[in-house]
Image (spheres, rainbow, N blue to C red):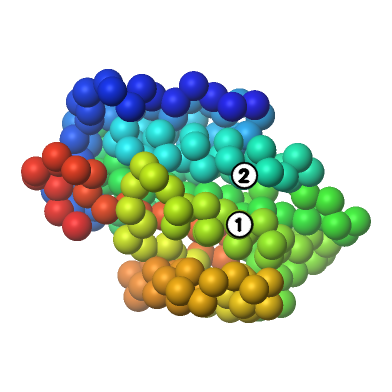
Amino acid sequence: MLVALLSASAPDRTESVGHPFSGRLKNGIRLEKGPDSYQLRWSTAKRGWNYGTRALVQGVRRVADQLARVDLEAAPLMVGNLSRRGGGDLPCSLSHNTGRDVDFGLYTLDKNGRSVPSRYYRFDRDGRSLEAGGRYRFDVARNWRLVRQLLSSPDFEVTTLVLNPHLERLILQYARESGEPDDLVERAGRLLQLPGYANLHRNHLHLRIACPRGHARCVD
């Protein structure tokens, strides 16, 4: 299940240049189609929007592997858009320009409570799918674990997690009731947001990471 990570001693030839909304990506690294621990959304792979900085690609792989290793019943983590190989605008996004942004499909439960691969269903304030007759549910526990794993990544620093406020409420409530450390829940609450420029984010979680060390032309 584990995939070989990029060697920690290998030089970082990628470079995130400029601002996420207007910059570019130099020598982007491709996130390959997934092993057992994650799936790359078909539209992302088809369009070639699966490139990122070394820190982002390595971090996504590691997060997916760690989640799968501790939860054998979970469907693979669904990974959506990263960036183009050279960065720049994506038609459906205002950011993703510099290899520091990635979308994740939300963990989903079927009517029998089984984890199923994300189909990017939108979820309402109670966690029911707006599509498929409401037969699918927002998997609160596993989506919290994803947020927790992202926040503890040794590969990158999280600057923003974009998610619908109703789904954020469900995640943070679960974390508190599960006895997660107060400082961790508070940090998650600070980073989870829905900026005014963003759409509703009811069907995916958007991650942005800080400028990797040594990327002198990168702008946070």
**Residue annotated with mark 2:** 67
Residue reaching furthest left? 216
Which residue lies at the image location 19% right of the left edge and 35% below the top edge? 15
x and y percentages locating residue 184 in the rendered image = 48, 69
Q: Is residue 140 visible?
A: yes
Instruction: Identify the amino acid type marked 2.
Output: Leu
Name the one closer to the observer, 44 or 176. Answer: 176
In primary-sequence order, the first of circles 2 and 1 is 2
Which quadrant would residue 154 be assigned to in this image? top left
x and y percentages locating residue 108 in the rendered image = 72, 55
Query: Would residue 182 appear left or right of 100 to someone viewing this image?
Result: right
Q: Is residue 91 visible?
A: no
**Residue annotated with mark 1:** 145
CA–CA distance in space, label 2 to label 1: 8 Å
Which residue lies at the image location 38% right of the left edge and 24% below the top edge? 6
Which residue lies at the image location 67% right of the left edge and 48% below the top edge? 118
Q: Are marks 2 and 1 in contact (CB under 8 Å)?
A: yes
Name the one closer to the observer, 175 or 164. Answer: 175
Query: Would residue 10 appear left or right of 213 to someone viewing this image?
Result: right
Query: Would residue 217 appear left or right of 68 to someone viewing this image?
Result: left
Residue reaching furthest right? 112
Is 71 above or below relative to 201?
A: above
Instruction: Identify the amino acid type marked 1.
Output: Arg
Say the numbered circle drawn on residue 179.
Answer: none
